[in-house]
Amino acid sequence: MTSVNEIRGEVLRPGDPGYDEARRIHNGMIDKRPAMIVRCRTAEDVAGAIATARASGLEISVRGGGHNVAGRAVCEGGLMIDLSLMKQTDVDPQAKTVCAQPGLNWGELNAATQAHGLAVTGGTISTTGIAGLTLGGGFGWLMGKFGFAADNLISAEVVTADGAIVTASDEENPDLFWALRGGGGNFGVVTEFQYRLYPVGPIITGGFNFWPFEQAAEVMRLFRETASEISDDLSLVAALVRSPEEPYPPLAGIIACHAGTEEEAERELAPIRAFGEPVVEAIVRKPYSDVNAQYDFGFPDGALNYWKSSFLKNLSDEAIESMINDFAKCPSRMSIMMMEDVHGAATRVPVSATAIPHRTAGFNLLIPSVWLDPAETDANVAWTRRTFEHLQPFLADGRYVNYLDDDEAQQGPDPLRAAYGVNYDRLVEVKTIYDPDNVFHLNFNIPPRASVD
């Protein structure tokens, strides 16, 4: 029997009230049953859970927001460290910083910081957890102006594999701090993040315009051309979607977030506003928190998700044609094909400064397939894989770790080499120091040196 002598948090086992709710995560395709869920409220709770798992020979998974598509937050037959109850925030408006616990999602953190007219780069879906997104690097609407979420991390409180509670920053454990900024959950359990904040809004310009699918190629070229000239204030995403209204026709659109003045926003968005006759015209002045939540309706909790993603060599006309042809055959009206523009401040950070190496301006392709009926799983997975395969000639080597799905290792070349590039070997060295036994391996795992020799 597993001892709970070391455990300070609430313990849930199969059959206990609340167990099934606690083990559920955002992606409805994931259905795993941990032997034990420890609902932590403090770093000491986390340390006790790690000690118990190690003494009992149980694998450890760590849940923050539970939003990651691969479902690595929950384990089968192991011990899940559940951080979702840890939701405290402490905003210092004078210093422009916030200390935030890992159970928060971006909507909750934005609410706390926007009360002071401040923000930091977050996700593009407000229900995404701050922990997983930041540890994977952290794309978001403000990355052109302020860099990735990880670029704005000042320090982190971390529980390591041996149960020690340490601070990681430029001054303390700087090698660990470097690895946490993009290296995922490989190095410990972060129980507090400290971010720098910036004046944002609270009213900015954001939203989306969509045009008939017959104009998709023109819309994508408009996106490509506009993105080549924009300031750090503006972030753009091109998307192929289906209308949420019957008969659910396909549409092509551009989604925008402009963090500058209204006058600057109108000047930069003029080419988009002037194009064609959109069937949806909804780029308006609204709160930053609303902009950060404008994808939420398309990604409901419990929906079935299967994603593919990679950086593009460039958004060529041939790539655009391939995307349009395949999207027309998409079996789910909830699925999307999107291109995120990476530019500005995120690209001015040296590749070696943090673990996330994606510092070249360009486009990241994401195909998030979403559906509701389990009977449609095979068709949707097959379409996603086939579409991604057709796009292989246009893909670059780099991949964003937060978008990797659970089967990546079986689908092609080593996804982590692609995700970390020249930083991979240094991540192995840090892993060897802080987790030589690979206790934290139910993630996109970077094995310690002893395991790879």
Image: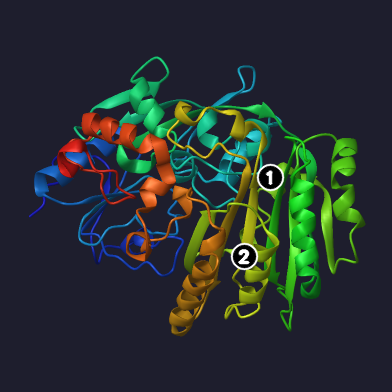
- For residue 204, side relative to residue 398 (left or right): right
- Is tag 1's residue or tag 2's residue first in the polypeptide sequence? 1
Which residue, given by chain and number where applicable, does mark 1 sit on?
Answer: 289
Q: Is residue 305 visible?
A: yes
Disc 2 secondary structure class: strand
Check disc 2 and give the amino acid type: Met
Which residue, given by chain and number where applicable, does mark 2 sit on?
Answer: 337
Relative vertical location of residue 235 with respect to residue 386 in this rendering, above or below: above
Q: Is residue 206 visible?
A: no
Q: Residue at x 16, y 43 (%)?
A: 451
Q: Residue at x 72, y 35 (%)?
A: 232
- For residue 199, side relative to residue 54 (left or right): right
Q: Which mark is residue 163?
A: none
Relative vertical location of residue 220 with respect to residue 452 in this rendering, above or below: below
Q: Quadrant of the N terminus?
A: bottom left
Q: Quadrant of the C terminus?
A: top left
Discs 1, 2 touching: Cβ within 8 Å: no
Q: Residue at x 41, y 41 (%)?
A: 420
Relative vertical location of residue 141 with respect to residue 387 in this rendering, above or below: above
Disc 1 secondary structure class: helix
Q: Position of residue 24 (x, y in %)?
A: 39, 62
Q: Residue at x 20, y 61 (%)?
A: 77
- Distance Cα–Cα, label 1 vs label 2: 24 Å
Q: Position of residue 141 (x, y in %)?
A: 66, 44
Q: Position of residue 438 (x, y in %)?
A: 20, 42
Residue placed most toward the observer, 264 or 82: 264
Check disc 1 and give the amino acid type: Ser
- For residue 321, side relative to residue 2 (left or right): right
Residue placed most toward the observer, 115 or 244: 244
Query: Which mark lies nearer to you, 1 or 2?
Result: 2
Residue placed most toward the observer, 250 or 414: 414
